[in-house]
Amino acid sequence: MRCVKSSVKITAIFSLLIVAGGLASAQTNDPDVGDMLDAAQQFAQDNLDPDVLQALQNVDRDKVEDFLNHYQDYLRGDYVLDVAQLKDGANAILPLLDAHEETQPYAVWLRSRLDYFEVADELTSALPPPKPEPGKPLPPLPNPPFKAEQEIWIKKVAPRPWPKGAAEIVPKMKTIFAGEHVPPQLVWLAEVESGFDARARSPAGATGMFQLMPATARRFGLSLWPRDQRRQSEVAAVAAAKYLRELHQQFGDWRLAVAAYNCGAKVVQKSLDRHHASSYDQIAVHLPAETQMYVPKVEATILHREGLDLEKLKTPAA
């Protein structure tokens, strides 16, 4: 049996590699990713078991550094097409995360987002090239409109079978959502967040099928210690449903509520105010890139699983 100390060390090194990209965007002064990787490598040499150290050495350092650098930009930026640059780096890192039990929660999280990188790549290929002007550099391609993303996500999601375990858990979650006066079809948000895998953990600390952040989980009554209730599917579903209901009460629109679930109510409200807007469509291209991917992916998933449009979901009566 692997000792607790070893598990903590392994988790620490992989957390450093992944969180380096995620946390940097929240700092006033961005740390140097190369320095972080050097520190991670030194930590590995001093502390990790030889087999784990060998696994780290087999990773292409340039790909990891490129992924982490662009991951920062991806989290902060609103330019969806930049997300395509993460595809190769994510595919290089994923097997490493999958190879060790301690880091598989990060692999679950990343695997659920690989199609973001693929769709960004497809959007880039689908857009007409910019028109050259004499004496001027080529202008960047415009951010794709919400409609274009909708179309690609519908095609992307359409052939997918039900995720493993969904047939058993979805009916229970629908009952929970309906009991919280939230459209039961919104349980498919868990497919987008985690593929219905409660092990999922993001670099920012979101955990469980519904990827609840610590503060959100506590606000809706979940305990994080000694047992993290975000990993208990039915308890987490109650918290997620309450949060979605609260967001819908604030915005009066399910697209905006779903966007706020992803990037936060303050970000959505600020964008609405700044652009004098009242709908998701009007602010879509100004939201964080992940949110621009997330909302049409949730919509396409609900359409595929339930045959219903997100905007037409009916709230169960109180």
Image (tube, rainbow, N blue to C red):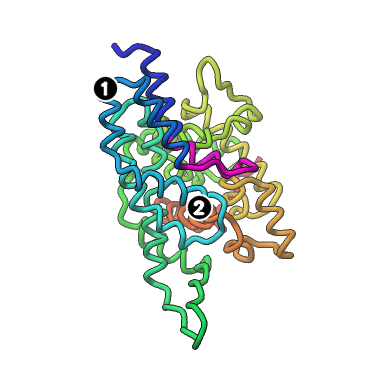
Q: How many marks?
A: 2
Which element type, helix, strand or loop, lies under badge 2?
helix
**Badge 1 or badge 2: first in the primary sequence:** 1
Q: Residue at x 43, y 52 (%)?
A: 301
Q: For the residues labelled 1 and 2, say whether their Cβ atoms are less than 8 Å apart.
A: no
Q: Residues within 10 Å of mark 1 (few under 14, many from 20)?
A: few
Q: Nearer the viewer, mark 1 or mark 2?
A: 1
Specify start and end residues of the magenta stretch as a single range: 17-33
- The answer to whether residue 251 shows anywhere in this view is yes
- The answer to whether residue 308 shows anywhere in this view is no
* Mark 2 lies on residue: 74
Which element type, helix, strand or loop, lies under badge 1?
helix
C-alpha span from label 1 to label 2: 33 Å
Report whether 310 appears left or right of 249.
left
Report whether 54 appears left or right of 106.
left
Q: Residue at x 70, y 53 (%)?
A: 269
Front position in the image: 108 or 217: 108
Q: Residue at x 40, y 35 (%)?
A: 106
